[in-house]
Image: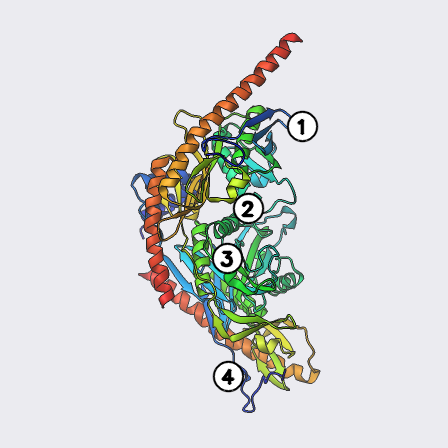
Amino acid sequence: MSRLELLTVEGLRIDGRRPNELRKITAKTSVLAQADGSAYIEQGNTKCLAAVYGPQEVRHRMQILHDRAIINVEFNVAPFSTSERKKRSKNDKRSLEIASAIKQTFEPVVQTSQFPRSQIDIYLQVLQHDGGTLQACINAATMALIDAGIPMIDYVCASTAGCIEKQPVLDLNYLEESSDSPELTVAILPRTGKVNLMSMESRLHVDMLESVAALATQGCEQIHTILDSVVRQNTQLLKDSMLQ
Amino acid sequence: MTENQVASSFSFKIFERIKPDEYFRRFIEENVRPDGRALHTFRPTSIRQGAITTANGSAMVRIGGTTVVCGIKAEVAEPRVDRPKDGFLVPNVELSPICSANFRPGPPSEQAQVNAEIINQVLINCDIVDLSELCIDEGKAVWSLYADIVCINYDGNILDASFLALLCALKDLSLPTAEVLPSSIVQANSSMMIKPLKLRRLPISSTFCIFANPKVTLSDPTDSEENLSKETVSIILDTDGKILYVHKSGGAMCDAEMMKSCFSRANERAAELNELIERTSSQ
Amino acid sequence: MKRSDGRTEPSQLRAFAASQSLLNRADGSAKFSFGESTVIASVVGPAEVKIRDEKMDEATVEVIVRPAVGFPSTKDKLLERALRQTVEPTILAGMMPRTLIQIVVQIVQEDGNMLSTAVNAISLAMLDAGLPMNSLAAAVSAIIDQEGNLLLDPNSKELENASSVHTFAFDNTTSYNLLLSHCIGTYSQEQYLDCLDACKHASERVHSFIRTAVEKRIEKEYQQLQSS
């Protein structure tokens, strides 16, 4: 089989994007009636749903922390979301790893010390997978936490970037992700620019790292603008309805 | 809002929390339900087919506040020796904590397992699909369809929603044409898609719950109504008015007359949903 | 007409058999058979309940089904829920708040109608355990075969030729209230109501059988007491 052409001679990618272009993002909040806060995000064909419950009573007594709230993250992939049906149990190692990465990303951002002896649950459900699950989950969780009205010091915005034929590219889709190109996920706090999460599981030359990271950071900022405008729009609607 | 209004709006919320059955009974005495529906009306229902592009067939169904997504993935499997032509259709229901705070993370709950089993038994016993249509090569390879029904938002009546989602996903299903090569490798040709399964009948589920005091039957119960009543009746009909499945349990209030009225409501509901399904598939 | 196991009437039930108090570690137990289909049920309770399942105003009823061979499957889960919801309304659970009533059903031999056999076994076992109850559940199954005949209490051979299978449970109050209806297959509303009616009459026979079984046992115990 011939190797897939991921970049055309004109420098366009397999789905027609330019190297520094994000996929289309659609974000909605308050999509679930049962949860305290919820969000749905589509980044291209990756679709992710987040629900936040809490702050509420801690379910297991022994986990109680007397000075702050604990954050509990459950990550679940719908069996039909990937191209190969895989029956993943909730406790498989990969899911646990992603859940713990998300938990660690949010722990320093959520003002947990305001809710001692309580628990905040973040449930994530991937409905369709087309690359960049982790970033979509982090963005969805941010929106759901904001929707739930849980105090945070800033947004957490995540984006991926990779490197194809020595050209840094932003926001990899499933095809690009699975064809051996390195993928770096970065989550930042946009106001201060602090890096909250950086993860890469493949090989990338150290000379490229800086430019790839810079591109991912740029992506995070773009995502921040989009998410922020959604939140502002929602708040405006809420304000209008209250003033009526 | 004046102060008085604020106080009264708070007090009815508190009333609902501390005396849910009494709160509910006062509504029922006025022949109306807390969400404004009449006793016999079902919640507005909508269907979207093909919502998941990674699945071979999919549908999203909303019944009021209950939302479920059904995605069907096809895999090639070896048929059973005693039925060399028959493929497999495996339904599975997932009720994860994302859809309601009442569900705990962990292994599937009794409710999820029971619903999957009911769907499975109806599929097997009621002659809905012909599994031999899933045959690729007799005795060598067949399609195995995994129908995963994921609840996204739970507000009661999961059986009706799951059944409807499964049906619409089956209608949406398309598979690549496949053949078994002499080297016993199955080759799929995804440029030629076919719709392999024809539904022989359209099973439509309607669920009711029965209150003891006052004695009333409610169509399409919500989560809070399900929690307050113990007795439920589920009826699955096909569009010719044949009954496929009746399950009633959990109380002793229901008699033949009540069952008859449930049947006629279920008949109306089946006609209504049949029309909706037709309209969705023709789009 | 003659049925595959030699019965002559479509409305004829297979021979009942029952014995009570056969397990000495449980609070109540009973064995019930419809012909070859046999089930043992045991009842423990009122006992301590897990905090998670505790109900403040009534007892929690739990039913566990153990199949004759292999591990419990989702089929048994369905059976568990149906059995629990059938017998729950007959127990005066409000008299035993914050306790657990645990019912274990062991399938011994399968020859059709496990659901109805299990309901009858549980009823007898609950009587044996002396639980406060307001009525007694009794269940009977029926099928409509491919030719449209209604056969009561089918065996597994007849079940293979069934176009629909119906199981009904009734209590023994004066109005014979319907406790459970579990019917699957393809059938019309008239056929459903016919089955309901036939099973209702047949369940009266099961009720009177349970009554004689209990009476006989008490008589025997009384005689033993007198002779000792």
Tag 4 near tag 1, CB within 8 Å: no
Comparing marks 4 and 2, which lies closer to the viewer? 2
Label 3 – label 4 distance at C-alpha: 34 Å
Which numbered disc covers residue C25?
Answer: 1
The residue that disc 2 covers is B110
Camera-nearest residue between A221 and C197: C197
Q: What is the C-alpha distance between the residues marked 2 and 1?
A: 28 Å
Q: Which residue is mark 3?
A: B149
Which element carries disc 3, helix, strand or loop? strand
Badge 4 and badge 2 both on one subunit: no
Kindly report which numbered mark, 4 or 1, lies closer to the viewer in this rendering.
1
Amino acid type, label 2: Glu
- Marks 4, 1 in one chain: no
Marks 3 and 2, how far apart at CA: 15 Å
Q: What is the number of the mark on residue A16?
A: 4
Which quadrant of the structure image shows residue C41?
top right
Which amino acid type is marked by label 4? Answer: Gly
Q: Report x, y in % for residue C63.
A: 57, 37
Q: Is residue B170 above or below residue B245?
A: below
**Helix or strand or loop: what does disc 4 sit on?**
loop
Are the residues under badges 3 and 2 in a single subunit?
yes
**Number of residues whose C-alpha sits closer than 10 Å to that of mark 3, classed few (under 14), some (14–19) or many (20 or more):** many
Q: Chain of mark 3?
A: B
Which residue is drawn at the image coordinates 47% and 32% (left, top)?
Answer: C89
Give a yes or no on whether discs 3 and 4 share a subunit. Answer: no
Q: Nearer the viewer, residue A98 or C179?
A: C179
- Could you tell me if residue C59 is visible in this image? no
Identity, as a three-letter code, of the amino acid under mark 3 = Ile
Q: CA distance from mark 1 to mark 3?
A: 43 Å
